[in-house]
Image: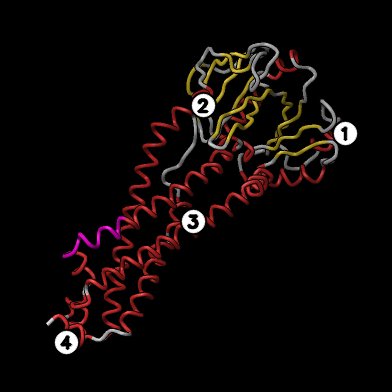
Amino acid sequence: MSSLLSPLLYCRRNLARTMPMAFVIALAVTLVSSIVTIVHSIDITVYTLYGYERHLAGITPRNALRMDPAIVAKIKKVPDLGKLFPTHSYTCLVKTIFGKMPLPIFGIDREGRELIMQRSGVVLASGRMPEDDKPEAVISEDIARNLGLKIGSQLCYPDSQDSYAPIPIILVGTLKGPVWLGLTSRTLVDTISPYTMAGFLAFAPTADIKQQRRLDKQLESVIDKGRARLWQFSGLVAETRSALSNLYLILDLVVGIVVFAISFVCALLANIYFTQRLPEIATLSAIGFQRKQLLLRVCGETALLSIVGWAGGLGFTVGLLSVIKKIFLIPRGLLLEPFDMTAFKFTLPLPLIITLFALATIAIRLRTLDPVSIIERRG
């Protein structure tokens, strides 16, 4: 008798009725997770584009081209300061899903280039490193794809609107690693661009992130904010969260509307299927099964379909986004993570809410169920 209440029984014998509901749930999961993944790619892009800030602090002057020597002297006395390198940079604009973003091409001495690469986990992927005093640069290979450049191409040049330099800067190598970097010779930039702003990059004595965070706080306490600006990872996180707060609010509203709409549709489907099964439900009630048992059976069936649809939707989402990433985004140097756990978390309420919606509506129907009259009509 207990097998009659198994949630698998109806689902297995009536695939033509149960699969549409599972398919609707899978589409809802795909829609929600795809939207969240695409929006979350903004975070991924920002933290990849400026992820080097985890391992250093940048200091630039305000209302001046060079740092005030008094401020530099205070910086050098900070306890957790390991290395301080002068930097004089160019900028190029990288195309992202949400528009163009500036990427600094750090003009820094050879020792500084080696340290920033080591701390950031970046290695030379192809070509060679730029030589001092020569108009040469290296950038991450993803940036090169993004900008459509190859080794030997001009990275910055006088006529460029997005990547200006007084003379052509030639790409001589590409980098590979978890963050994007652009590096060139500081002495070259000092020579050909003496009237552009120059600053410093400050590193902790070791690669310990906690020590770098302590250095960031110490620098913040000694730098006069009216005469210099400190660029640090905590500031990057705060600015990103602030800039995207309204976007995430809209995302939450869209996801909430989608979840409610799909839950309502699935509840209607569950009611339709329940109406079609009234003779079966009435017979089970007539032979002694309680309404509570019947309700738990319907709940189990709905939960099973929700879980199957949810799992299928996640699998379809990963496959779809992987294809989109490979065909459309990677060739353009754009970032997307198909296995985005944040997106998957947004879909977790779907099975639960769908089951509760269906349970609530069917419970009302069961409360007024008269098995005798239904059986008599069938007879």
Q: Residues within 10 Å of mark 1 (few under 14, many from 20)?
A: few
Q: Residue at (76%, 45%) from the top-left corner? A: 218
Residue 260 image point, x, y percent: 45, 63
State whether residue 251 appears in this view.
yes
Q: Residues within 10 Å of mark 3 (few under 14, many from 20)?
A: many
Residue 337 vertical position relative to residue 161 in the rendered view, above or below? below
Residue marked by disc 3: 255
SS for callout 4:
loop
Q: Which mark is residue 146?
A: 2
In this view, the residue in front, 209 or 9, is 9
Earlier in the chain: of badge 4 and badge 1, it is 1
Mark 1–mark 3 contact, CB under 8 Å?
no
Residue 156 image point, x, y percent: 63, 17
Asked if residue 140 is among those painted magenta in the image, a careful observer would answer no
Structural distance between the alpha carbons of marks 1 and 2 = 41 Å
Earlier in the chain: of badge 3 and badge 4, it is 3
Which quarter of the figure has residue 171?
Answer: top right
Identify the amino acid type marked 2. Answer: Asn
Which quarter of the figure has residue 68?
Answer: top right
Identify the amino acid type marked 3. Answer: Val
